[in-house]
Amino acid sequence: MPITQGNSAVRENRPSRQHAEGRAAVLAIGTANPSGTIPQEEFTDQFFRMSNSNHLTDLKGKLKRICNKTGIEKRHFHLSEEVLLAHPEFLDRELPSLDARINMVATAVPKLAESAALKAIAEWGRPATDITHLVFSTYSGCRAPSADLELATLLKLRPTVSRTILSLHGCYGGGRALQLAKELAENNRGARVL
């Protein structure tokens, strides 16, 4: 549709977007979790012990009550006691630890995403180079270059793949990533969204 500006018509040069013929469908699912697992009933005790906070008994009791009501059975963690012992700055508020945390996440998050993505790609049965769009959501870290670029590199996706990252959205990020992937698939004919 031409856009009018004053008395003259200005034609839009962008090609019209071709929508998909049907609705989006999930063709494969891949999941991955950090290897460290803590049963929910042990989480509070372990957290307060590892953070040298057992003396905060009221807070510990409050967290234990919250944890008991969540319905969560186990928690997955990248951080282990060994990692915390190797990085005492993580537990000392007086010591700077942001760079160390960012560097740890910058390596761990793309590797975890790669593990899940490879499972989904294998189940899908097509080569990763057929992927046209990548939607990546993480609550763990925000850095440039971002984890979606690292994942695209690890998976050897084409350099033309359209990448979108959702950072620091919490649990909401996963739902929004699925919604965005659906919109991309339905509004771009031939789209293959990971």
Image (cartoon, rainbow, N blue to C red):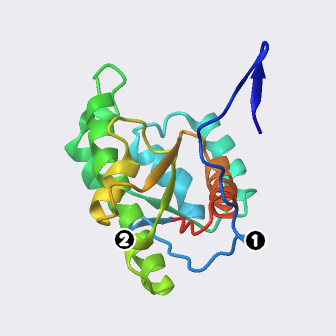
Which residue is label 2 attached to?
129
Report the side of 162 relative to 29 (left or right): left
Is 121 situated above or below 76? below
How many labels were placed on the picture? 2
Residue for point 42% across, 47% down = 49
Q: Quadrant of residue 114?
A: bottom left
Which residue is label 1 attached to?
23
Image position, residue 99 (x, y; %): 27, 31
Image position, residue 69 (x, y; %): 75, 56
Residue for point 68% across, 41% down = 62
Query: Could one spot residue 80 in this view of the protein?
Result: no
In depth, the one of 118 and 161 nearer the eye is 161
Report the side of 79 relative to 140 (left or right): left
Where's the N terminus, which quadrant? top right
SS assignment at label 2: helix
- Estimate how packed mark 1 is, as few (under 14), some (14 to 19) or many (20 or more) residues with alpha carbons within 10 Å: few
Query: Which amino acid type is shown beneath numbered disc 1?
Result: Arg
Image position, residue 118 (x, y; %): 39, 75
Query: Could one spot residue 20 in this view of the protein?
Result: yes
Q: Quadrant of residue 103?
A: top left
